[in-house]
Amino acid sequence: MVATAATSSFFPVTSSPDSSDSKNKKLGSGSTNLGGIKPKPSASSGSLQVKANAQAPPKINGTTVVTSSVEGFKNEDGTGSPHPRTFINQLPDWSMLLAAITTIFLAAEKQWMMLDWKPRRPDMLIDPFGIGRIVQDGLVFRQNFSIRSYEIGADRTASIETLMNHLQETAINHCKSAGLLGEGFGATPEMCKKNLIWVVTRMQVVFDRYPTWGDVVQVDTWVSASGKNGMRRDWLVSDSKTGEVLTRASSVWVMMNKLTRRLSKIPEEVRGEIEPFFMNSDPVVAEDSRKLVKLDKSMAEHVRKGLTPRWSDLDVNQHVNNVKYIGWILESAPLPVLETHELSSMTLEYRRECGRECKLQSLTTVSDSSVGDLVNVGEIECQHLLQLEEGSEIVRGRTQWRPKYAKSFGNVGQIPAESA
């Protein structure tokens, strides 16, 4: 009786209509009503039965363990009825939700650890892939580069092509950061409208010291006017940690019509775009006024034939990249010079462009020295010519070489202050 009452308080049992009719019949057929007390229904009158566990609750270590006295509900035909809906069994499966939250948290933590790595060395905090920034009153562009293992040569120093590519990259990024980059490659919006592109006509480079693997170099570049229809661009490359100047370069650029391939004057619309960024300063490399001589096969001591541009040598303007010309010029340099000396400076004059179908040859002459006695020779000067095999000039050049591991690198330049 007590078990039944306790069970019904948690699991209310609904009586069937048949049992209520049976009760009414028995009560109305002369059964005695004792002060409103209803008689106990017989076992056969209820449609549902509750089996109570009459055993005493077990004890474990002296503590009474309460067990459920309900085994289940069964209908008269022996089939089980579903458990009644309570607050507890209507809750969601918290274990599955907790497992999902834990999985998401662990995945996010792993991703954060992969992205938010922080090197311990202060010199590694520089982002070598950054686009750079404008400094010095908005007229100088600065960008850092890390020397990679695949950018060094046999001397374990950065190759000439690597250093020249750094100069070219900063020039393009300077235009982009200044908002002067149109649809073309290094061309302003007005230049794009008029089908104009920049081409380099002269370049002077001085290599004071070559960076090595792992060094981070800082490249500064700025532009100035060069005559009426030209623009001069200067570069200063230094060690980002010590400030030591490594390379200085100065170049002159003019405009060419992309369709006619002829040189063009600077239109006033274009001049209005670029003049606000001009610095009034002297070249970072003093101009070498000596005339570059024209070589021919009778004068050349070393000739390298059969040079042909590859598809990868072309830039977006469909001519050979000017950095590639430097590599071709050095193709004819004598091996003893390359083994005992390193390039200290070069002066190049670009005569005409070169396309994909061209076949070239490289000519070199060593001035005032004998190649066979280069071990005991100090500085060496070479004359160069890159030309088509049919004779048309592409690039004239002059290079100077110093003995490898020389300690004296001469005077170095600084970023110029804008003149009044």
Image (cartoon, grey):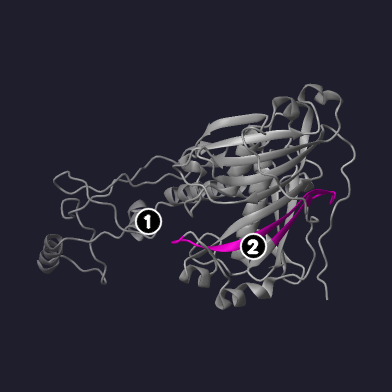
Residue at the spot of label 2:
174
Any magenta on residue 235?
yes
At x 19% / y 54%, what residue is drawn?
42
- Alpha-carbon distance for marks 1 and 2? 86 Å
**Amino acid under label 2?**
His
At x 35% / y 54%, what residue is drawn?
7
**Amino acid under label 1?**
Ala
Depth check: give the residue in front, 183 or 408.
408
At x 39% / y 46%, what residue is drawn?
68
Say which quarter of the image contains residue 87. Answer: bottom left
Q: Position of residue 286 (x, y in %)?
A: 81, 56
Secondary structure mostly taken by the magenta-highlighted segment of the chain: strand
SS under mark 2: helix
At x 48% / y 39%, what residue is drawn?
310
Residue 325 is left or right of residue 211, and the answer is: left
Name, please, the residue furthest toward the front: 298
Residue at the spot of label 1:
6
Residue 190 is left or right of residue 344, and the answer is: left
Q: Where is the C terminus found, in terms of image quarters?
A: bottom right
Depth check: give the residue in front, 121 or 224.
224
What label does residue 95 carry, if any? Answer: none
Sequence-first disc among 1 and 2 = 1
The residues colored magenta run 233-260
